[in-house]
Image (spheres, grey):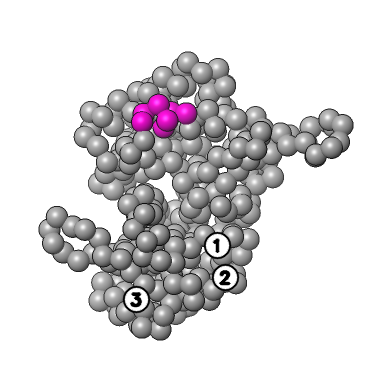
Amino acid sequence: MSSPPPSIPATATALSPAEPLAHQVLAGLAQHRIATTSQLRRMLRPAGTRQLMSRVLNRLRSDGFVDCTVLPDANRTRTHAWYLTQEGARLTRDLPVLRGRPPHPITSKTAASLKTPHTLAVVRAHLAFAADARRLGHEHGPWDWTPEVSHSIGEGERIITDAVMYYTVIDSEHRRKLRAFVEVDRSTMSSERLAVKLIEYARLFHYEAQPAGRRRQASAGPTWLRWYPVFPRVLFILTGAPRTRLENRMNDLQAMVAQHPLVTNLARKVRLAAAVLEDLEQHGPAQNVWIPLVGGNPRPWTHL
């Protein structure tokens, strides 16, 4: 799994808009692992046509750099989910925009079939934030969303967050940089297992690594300070079940905040919230769609 990302958002080294679209597609698939034709268009060319993206993808497939799997669809339409081949992964390994991020590509149809549903849901969440950023004049692009970031939480255990998000709110001449750990839940695990994620984030918040074989030294602070100036918000994005069931899962997250002492302490210092993915897509993340896990009325994620 990838190491924690550098503290400088990827926007600082993003591909130029003048970069050929084929290069951007390869970098986008290296970053996000798998995406549909429509998702790649919305990610890289939101004002472009589907035909343009399809032409580029088919050319890259002919050259052996990408491949695709066809998703099952009740409407019997053919939706292609694209991923890098081994040759495509090798080609993108040294891209500046991906520097410092160990690759974890999907390079076979078998791996794609296993990873596709969850990975595409994570991409959907990213695209909701990206669309909001374009509409509001904020900054959040394809390279400001790093999937599957791993952090040590001690005792040989690690927490793997679905994505680390970098987002810059621009208000007149003021810029406010926000970061978030994003967990996308498709209701495939028990509600209790989902809520336990909060304990893992609380452990990360408090974890301080000590050099092996040395006497305990004065602490340099929690390990997360190596990568983040402030601890990122923790955002749960739920989908894959009827509304009532999703609300019950949010209630269980709130109960964990209220009942577990480590999580209660985390919630005093870190913004925690949950929302429904379909609400983000329909209304936008900047609307009152986020339920604070400490309780209270729905609000934008930037105003938790």
The answer to whether residue 204 is magenta is no
Q: Which amino acid does label 1 sit on?
A: Pro
The reply to whether dot 2 and dot 3 touch (C-beta < 8 Å) is no
Q: Residues within 10 Å of mark 3 (few under 14, many from 20)?
A: many
The Cα–Cα distance between marks 3 and 1, rounded to whole angstroms, is 21 Å
Residue positioned 55% across, 33% down in the render: 201
Q: How many labels does the image show?
A: 3
Residue under numbered circle 1: 103
The answer to whether residue 244 is above or below residue 48 is above
Q: Residues within 10 Å of mark 2 (few under 14, many from 20)?
A: some
Residue under numbered circle 2: 93
Q: Where is residue 171 shown, x and y percent of the image?
A: 47, 48
Residue under numbered circle 3: 57
Q: Quadrant of residue 51?
A: bottom left
Q: What kind of element bears circle 1?
A: loop
Q: Give the range drawn in magenta.
A: 190-196
Q: Which of marks 2 and 1 is nearer the N terminus?
A: 2
Q: Earlier in the sequence, mark 2 or mark 3?
A: 3
